[in-house]
Image (cartoon, rainbow, N blue to C red):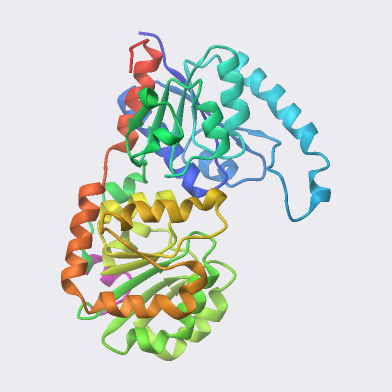
Amino acid sequence: MKQLKVIIAGGGTGGHIFPAVAIGHALQRMKPGTELLFVGAIGKMEMEKVPQEGFRIIGLDITGFNRNNMLKNILLPIKLIMSAWKSRTIIKEFNPDVVVGVGGYASFPVLNAAQSKGVHTLIQEQNSFAGKSNKILGKKAEAVCVAYENMDQFFPQNKIKLTGNPVRHIIVQSSFNQLDGQQIFGLDPDYRTILVVGGSLGAKSINEAIDKDLEKIIEDGTQVIWQTGKHYFEQARKRAEPFGDKVKVFEFIKQMDKGYAAADMVISRAGALAIAELCIVAKPVIFVPYPYAAEDHQTSNAMALVKKDAALLVKDNAAATDLISELERLKKDDKKQKSMSEQLRKIAIKNADERIAQYIIDLANGIAI
């Protein structure tokens, strides 16, 4: 039987990289011997993270348009031309059966090159509001795998596949219960636990709101796991010192499955990956969407859950005044917490990686999807 050859292109953030890696691992499980090649952007985190997962990656010298420093855009046209040329070379030399785009700078030139050569293409759109590149690529892609309903406003209805967003295997397969998680973090099992995460880089508005009202948060038998990101870590660490073991501060939590396990409730940004994970772990959540994401897609992502009574939302510019008061109301409403968890479980899709991998395999074999 012919060996399957697949290119997975894109990256830039964990929200693109983790789904890409999950799809790659699913393909190798379901179709042993699959040859995979990842294509990312030089200088972005995929160039480090993807090889750590055991995959080969090639980098394109490509960036986006810089609105803050126009001088940095001088070389952009040359980079776009060179990336397009290199993408065509990669397609020709690797000769893939299917090319998958997961979003990020490298996704467009590689999928565009594949489509111009008649190679099967599939898009994995993580967000509820599709970006401009994916909307363009979606016209020629054979399938667009999505995590939200009503995506026909962006893509042809007959190409849309509701697969969910792939998440890290360690989250899906986690066997840790709450007591396990609390013991790992050195927490008191008799206290309520709040997990605060603002993405890998942290979230200024969330950090400042927690900092401002930390006494209020913990006064009623509550403890906090606080992921701050690099820039706020030292300030948060000093702020937490008087509270001893009631406030655990981390720059970054590598074993997020254990953090989720320990928590009763979560405060989080609303990236597509975070939402997919929170649906699976089904912990009541307050989202504070990052307001500067493209097309404000984090707010759109969060609202898809809010409309189903599966989450609460506090706007970024209101976090200082509203976040902790919203948390206090939720802490007192056990019925609301239970209902939110039930709704999150209904939305969760645990095998998104395998659903997408199967579509890729079918495309390669010429099976209509």
Query: Where does residue 192 sit, x and y in percent of width and height?
Result: 25, 77
**What residue lies at 46% left-to-right and 87% top-to-bottom?**
241
**What residue lies at 39% left-to-right and 16% top-to-bottom?**
363
Query: Where does residue 194 sit, x and y in percent of width and height?
Result: 32, 73
Q: Is residue 147 above or below residue 303?
A: above
> Quick one: quadrant of the C terminus?
top left
Residue 222 picture quarter: bottom left
Query: Where does residue 120 sit, x and y in percent of width and height?
Result: 47, 17
Q: Is residue 6 above or below residue 134?
A: above
Query: Where does residue 323 sit, x and y in percent of width and height?
Result: 41, 75
What segment carries the magenta color? 179-188
> Quick one: quadrant of the N terminus?
top left
Along the viewing direction, whichever of 339 and 367 lies nearer the viewer: 339
Residue 281 appearing in the image: yes
Along the viewing direction, whichever of 173 and 363 lies nearer the viewer: 363
289 drawn magenta: no
Q: Is residue 178 above or below residue 45?
A: below
Q: Is residue 112 left or right of residue 219?
A: right
